[in-house]
Image (tube, grey):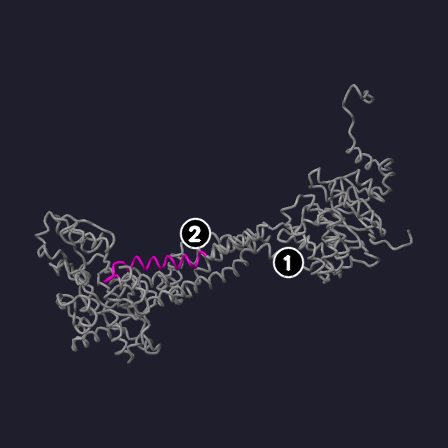
Amino acid sequence: MLDSALNVFRQGRNLARLMEGLWVTLEISAVSVLLSMLLGIVVGLLMTTRKPLWRAAARLYLELVRFVPILVLLYIFYYTLSRNWGINLEAKIVAVLVFTLWGTAEMADLVRGAATSLPAHQRESGRAIGLTESQINRYVIIPQAVRRLIPGVINLTTRMIKTTPFVFFINVPELTKVGQQIVEVAGMKNYMASFWVYAFIFFIYFAVCYPISRFSGFLEKKWEN
Amino acid sequence: MSTAQPVLRIRDLHKKYDRLEVLHGISLDVPRGRVLVVIGPSGCGKSTLLRCINGLEAIESGDIELNGESISSGKTRWNLVRQKIGMVFQSYDLFPHMTVMGNILLGPLKAQGRDRREVTREAEQLLDRVGLLDRKDSYPRQLSGGQKQRVAIVRALCMNPEIMLFDEVTASLDPEMVREVLDVMLGLAERGMTMLIVTHEMAFARAVADKIIFMDQGVIVESAPPNVFFENPVSDRARRFLNIFQFDGVKKEEQPHVES
Amino acid sequence: MLKAKIFRVLVPALALMFLAAPALAAGELAKIKEAGKIRIGVFSDKPPFGYVDENGDHRGYDVYLARRLAQDLLGDENKIEFVLVEAASRMEVLESNKVDLILANFTVTPERAQRVDFAKPYMKVALGVVSPANAPVTDVAQLRGQKLIVNKGTTADIYFAEKHPEVNLLKYDQNTEAFNALRDGRGAALAHDNTLIFAWINENPGFVSGISFLGNLDSIAPAVKKGNTELLDWLNEEIVRLGQENFFHKNYDATLKPIYGDTVDPETVVVEGGVLE
């Protein structure tokens, strides 16, 4: 019975299709995380400037994006933009855009936290031993800021991977949707197919996210000193 | 001695924070191998003076010379000047992500580009001198406050500075740790290090100083050898300041009531 | 599969659509030809109408028609960009110009006809009642006082609640739950879209479709963006043309028959030439 149930992975290109779905998931997550990190650093630093207007703008952006559900953002950028303003964006672009908007807000908050928690005299200590400003950034400020950021960034990455199934909403066939397609076809004859396919998907998410969070734990432990 | 060029020469230094003038025309010389101790009430500008010397604060006017060369011209390449001026702060300012050794080597290797083996040997000698050689691979959070300040001193010394500036380095320490840090500084004085020290430890000041500089409200009020200053201060302000550190006895039987 | 939570009635709007005057200015057909492909919204997980098979190829009754339309419009049945749609997003993708055409088991309703334009139908759907082969239910009268399994909010649920209050309804959320309940004998029969029932009984030999045709007859048709009359007219002509060669019966034989088997009369499902009987 197990053997026949597992046949679902041997039929045609089913396994390859799941992997292609995983690739879509990882592609969207990876690009979004990367962009979020870059933009999040900019927005996060804006939040720490002394210019109240910049700070207010960054704050507003952060609160807005965080409180609007992802599905609503996907809807607005995929459907509303095209219907009401004729801006017809490709689904994957919309996915990356929305995840980046969200990730940037999260990242900005992390950066703000890391930047404000670094004491000012770390920079002065660097100056006092004759380091140039760029050497201070390189050897003193950035390593410490990165250490403070890494756990949050990794947490954000896994959350992003786990949120990608939402893109089914704008018709992108990522891992979970491919799984559903397979289940609905194979399930007509194979009642255990849905169990095995979803168990497999569960395993894939675990296999992807677990090492990432373990890596984070490893770094935290390493840098605890 | 008076004809020799001082390591540090300051002339008519003025410094403002916004509109508040905190230094009004400070002039002083620190000759080679001498120890000057700056004392005075809080807010008198003594910490600001140290911060101006190594460029952590911009100055309004006046001149600062290091070994006869002006370092207040505006074209000063501070990263080079600061290699010759060691500074230790009140707050524990070690880099928390580096070991003791990493903290000490950073400046000599990156700022001065010296040979790692040579600097490591020197760092180990210095650590040994302050009794912390066995902690060279520890991280700052594993050290006590006194140990951290001793490492901070070694970090500054390892740059082979012309002069050392100490900005109330024992002010944040628990009393039992003050001594170990002061002993290190006394040791430096014995070895002929040129030093400019800001402190509230009067007994230490008296023991270590070649000259006491008393500052109040942004000016040098009095400057004299320690025994002269502590026993016969000339100015009222200095007398009032020193009185803060004196206590009248309160045990009635032993201490006859003299004044009313 | 056909999760019809939508209120169904016969469609007076269809007539209106057929009368609509073509707006020649649109140039929609020219645009498609210029792009060299037609964008068609299909289901990817609703066999046997629109699904992706184990090799990753689009299949099903809707897809079979989609390929023929591409062949006739662009001269190549592969000049299609398939956009995978969900039941809930079918109108949105048209309105937001993500697709030129929807072929996704789209039941015509007056509400929907206000937002999109339906072409002539190519399929029809009614309610069916499935029951165990050894105790077949062939007439609604047999259900009086009996338990009938339905899915909450579906056409079957609404129909029986309104028209046959004498039947006790046992309601489930999911299709699989409902069919499992029937298998476990928790109800005398189960009512659902007949197209879904046909597919299910073929895989479950112990059950029969005692009533294949009940309630309102709904039609399933291609849909285009509101006002895209050029493509709509072409579709309507095309559906009539295809009817002349009995295309939809061929489609049935190729895509639905392997699922439904021989027991189902194709005439209960297929609409040929856009004429609903």
Left or right: C267 as drawn, with respect to A34: left
Neighbourhood count class around disc 2 (C-alpha, 10 Å): few under 14, some 14–19, many 20 upward: few
Question: Label 2 amino acid?
Answer: Phe
Say if residue A155 shows up in the picture: yes
Which of C269/C238 is in front? C269
- Quarter occupied by the C terminus of chain B: top right
Q: Is residue B103 magenta?
A: no
Neighbourhood count class around disc 1 (C-alpha, 10 Å): few under 14, some 14–19, many 20 upward: some
Mark 1: secondary structure: helix
Residue B7, image quadrant: bottom right
Q: Which residues are magenta?
A: A187-210
Q: Which mark is residue A139?
A: 1
Left or right: A211 as drawn, with respect to C252: right
Which of B198/C100 is in front? B198
* Mark 2 or 1, nearer chain start: 2
Residue at left offset 13%, top offset 66%: C264
Contact between marks 2 and 1 (CB within 8 A): the answer is: no
Q: Chain of mark 1?
A: A
Q: Is residue A206 magenta?
A: yes
- Count of labels in the image: 2
Residue at left offset 79%, top offset 31%: B246
**Residue furthest to the bottom:** C75
Mark 2: secondary structure: helix
Q: Which residue is mark 2?
A: A67
Q: Are marks 2 and 1 on the same chain?
A: yes
Question: Label 1 amino acid?
Answer: Tyr
